[in-house]
Image: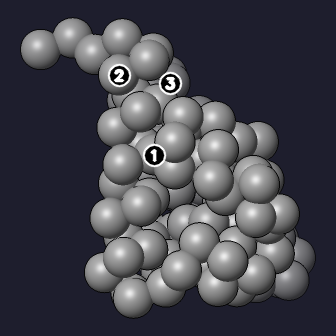
Amino acid sequence: MIFTLHDQMTGLGKRIKARRLAFDLSQEAASAKAGVAHRTWRRMEAEGKASIEDLIRAAIALRCDDGIVGLFPEMAANSMDQLLAQQRKATKTQRQRAGGARP
């Protein structure tokens, strides 16, 4: 089934509302917990409209932010050269995170 933009947005709003209700939170309490204006929260639930920042704040407040990382996964390599480049990039990133310099 192909979902339109409107379908995706209204579905998202419904899921936000269902998640909030599962935590037994009022809109006011959820918006305060997320650090989002109450009016914005109402719009998120009713229309699925929010800034990316507000959506992430809502996801964190409703404890479902782990799915954000999976929204835009890295593309699979189409060739051996691309695979090797991805591996080099991953190794470099790991070294930078660890604070280590190249031996």
In the image, taking residue 86 as reference, residue 49 lies left or right, namely right
**Which amino acid does the dot numbered 2 rest on?**
Asp
Pointer 3: what residue? 82
Image quarter in which the C terminus is found? bottom right
User: What is the basis of the colouring in this image?
Assistant: one colour
Pointer 1: what residue? 13
Is residue 84 visible to the viewer in this orientation of the structure? Answer: no
Q: Residue at x 75, y 81 (%)?
A: 32
Q: Where is residue 13 shown, x and y percent of the image?
A: 45, 46
17 relative to 7, above or below = below
Task: Give the Cα distance between marks 2 and 3.
Answer: 36 Å
Q: Which residue is drawn at 39% across and 87% down?
A: 23
Say whether disc 1 or disc 2 marks the residue closer to the N-terminus.
2
Tell me the number on the disc at residue 64: none
Q: Which of 74 and 22 is in front in this view?
A: 22
Q: Residue at x 53, y 80 (%)?
A: 26
**How packed is label 1: few (under 14 Cα within 10 Å), some, or many (20 or more)?**
many
Indicate the quadrant where residue 76 lies. top left
Q: Mark 3 vs mark 1: give the one in front.
A: 1
Tell me the number on the disc at residue 7: 2
**Which amino acid does the dot numbered 1 rest on?**
Gly
Q: Where is residue 72 shown, x and y percent of the image?
A: 51, 38
Is residue 22 visible to the viewer in this orientation of the structure? Answer: yes
**How packed is label 3: few (under 14 Cα within 10 Å), some, or many (20 or more)?**
few
Secondary structure category for the residue under label 2? helix
